[in-house]
Image: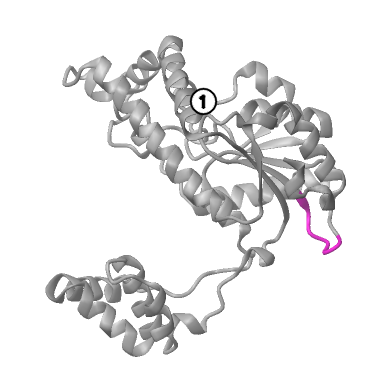
Amino acid sequence: MKDTNNKPRIIGLVGATASGKTALSLAVAQALGCEILCMDSMQIYKRMNIGTAKPTAEEQALVPHHLLDIVEPDAGFSVAEYVTLAHETIRQTVDRGVIPMLVGGTGLYLRGLSLPMDYGGLPSDPILRAALQKQLDQYGAEKLHAQLRAVDPVTAARLHPNDTRRVIRALEIHQLTGQPMSAHQTPTDADAPYDFQLYAIDWPRTELHARINLRVEQMMREGLLDEVEGLLRSGIDASMQSMQGLGYKELIPVIQGRANLKEAIEQIKTGTRNYARRQLIWFRRDKRIHWIPSSQLRRAKDMIIQNWEDPASWTSKTC
């Protein structure tokens, strides 16, 4: 289905971990005949099921799922690789007359899909970047920021001197292109290749934290410790990208006899709560998202369906 701008329409259910995305996505997808595209940077890994809160085999049988279990845990995987696969999956889904539904909390994946498909980015030079890093190490952040202010005052005004990574990037762009970063047009959400209709469930912080704690406890009961131990026994190195995920990195020292299980579980809970906070900060900046109060969760499916069928129907009074 396409909108009036001839862009494919896509439903997206995003937001914090443990907010209830899976259950709601299944209900909406069954009602509208959607196929679900995973948008989670951990659920892409095979054999990592419990700690990633991957939809169960029974849940996957209810609705076709894509972009789950696509790489082995000992393989690297980038945002660019995800975006390439997701674009192709969306194209195939739309060509079959099916509504794609993105489900997950990885904001970088959504951001990648929101950029124009021909957006190749600005040039980079690792040698130049290393030279700028050396200047930073020698002279400090304030001097590097002053250098940027002299050639690109617009960008310097919006970057804090301590945001050294972006300051270096802005100087790199100026030296490579002869123009300030502010002169290069940055794509906006309006330039996205799709018409996104995005939703998220909004929980009070204390209730979300309680849900996270319960989820971690449930994962442990389901055998998360055995899952991590099995991965290590199969030859997956503890340093791999996949093993840095929450629930995995905390249990590795327990298995190796270097940490206490009870303390590790508390670390998982704390780390997951902090991760959820960062997710919410990220997604609240995205003005495209319709936030559904948790008090309206029983009506959420009908609210989304109504808005899909009549995009003008969503108002602040809906909630």
Q: Which residue is mark 1?
A: 53
Q: Which x, y percent locates residue 306? A: 84, 40
Q: Can residue 47 be spotted in the picture?
A: no
Q: Residues within 10 Å of mark 1 (few under 14, many from 20)?
A: some
Magenta residue check for 6: yes
Compared to 192, does 314 lie above or below?
A: above
Q: Which x, y percent locates residue 106? A: 52, 44
Magenta residue check for 19: no
In depth, the one of 72 and 128 nearer the eye is 128
Q: Which residue range is magenta in the image?
A: 4-9
Q: Is residue 42 left or right of residue 100?
A: left
Amino acid residing under circle 1:
Ala
Image quadrant assignment for residue 230: top left
In depth, the one of 257 and 306 nearer the eye is 306
Image quadrant assignment for residue 140: bottom left
Q: Quadrant of the C terminus?
A: top right
Q: Can residue 72 be spotted in the picture?
A: yes
Residue at (70% x, 20% y) in the render: 61
Q: Is residue 311 left or right of residue 290?
A: right
Residue at (24% x, 75% y) in the render: 132
| SS for dot 1 | loop
Residue at (41% x, 74% y) in the render: 158
Q: Which residue is the extreme one toward the left?
A: 138
Residue at (44% x, 17% y) in the render: 219
Q: Which x, y percent locates residue 229? A: 32, 17
Q: Main secondary structure of the magenta part?
A: loop
Q: Is residue 242 left or right of residue 315?
A: left
